[in-house]
């Protein structure tokens, strides 16, 4: 199907304009840091007290260290361990976390496959993690 030059230009320009409009209407995280009072006004209502705090997902902010760096490894290990200890779904598990050059190794014992998957998910979502090796054992029942 042959398209005229006008319709081809239209198909190329419209998505770019939509992207620019969306980017301009998005909240600026840098402005929230500079003006916390204004950011608090625009912030959504706080979550109910009974809701468990959600672990942060990977962010677009630049990390202090690149993946594979020793600082990133220490930070990732600490964040993963904190998340694992805070989650009540992992009660009764004994999980060790070791991070080396961006590769997280999980070892120890969990009660079921669900706990193993939860631990892997916490490890995968941390900044500085390139790969997760899940070596968790589930006891025979």
Image (spheres, rainbow, N blue to C red):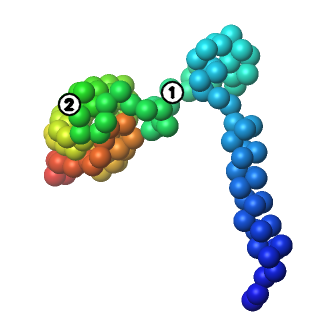
The residue located at (78%, 82%) in the rendering is 3
Kindly indicate the quadrant of the structure image that contains residue 42. top right
Q: Nearer the viewer, residue 42 or 20?
A: 20
Relative side of 116 to 48, left or right: left
Q: Nearer the viewer, residue 116 or 7?
A: 7
Answer above or below: position of 78 versus 112.
Answer: above
The residue tagged with tag 1: helix, strand or loop?
Answer: loop
Answer above or below: position of 62 versus 18.
Answer: above
Kindly indicate the quadrant of the structure image that contains residue 41. top right
Image spot of residue 99 (x, y percent): 20, 37
Q: Nearer the viewer, residue 7 or 106?
A: 7
The residue located at (48%, 32%) in the rendering is 61
User: Can residue 94 be seen at all in this image of the molecule?
Assistant: no
Image spot of residue 96 (x, y percent): 18, 34
Image spot of residue 71 (x, y percent): 25, 27
Q: Compare marks 2 and 1 and give the one earlier in the sequence.
A: 1
User: Which residue is tagged 1?
Assistant: 52
The residue located at (29%, 46%) in the rendering is 130
User: Which residue is tagged 2?
Assistant: 70
Q: CA distance from mark 2 to mark 1?
A: 31 Å
The residue located at (16%, 52%) in the rendering is 140
């Amino acid at each position: 199907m042959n398209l005229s030059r006008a319709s081809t230009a239209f198909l190329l320009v419209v998505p770019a304009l939509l992207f620019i409009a969306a980017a301009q209407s998005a909240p600026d995280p840098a402005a929230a840091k500079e003006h916390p009072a204004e950011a608090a006004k625009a912030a959504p209502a706080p979550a109910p007290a009974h809701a468990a705090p959600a672990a942060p997902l990977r962010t677009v902010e630049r990390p202090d260290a690149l993946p594979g760096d020793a600082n990133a490894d220490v930070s990732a290990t600490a964040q993963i361990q904190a998340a694992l200890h805070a989650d009540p779904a992992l009660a009764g598990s004994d999980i060790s976390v070791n991070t080396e050059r961006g590769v997280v190794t999980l070892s120890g014992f969990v009660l079921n496959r669900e706990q193993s998957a939860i631990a892997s998910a916490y490890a995968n979502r941390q900044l500085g993690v390139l790969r997760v090796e899940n070596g968790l054992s589930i006891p025979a029942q």
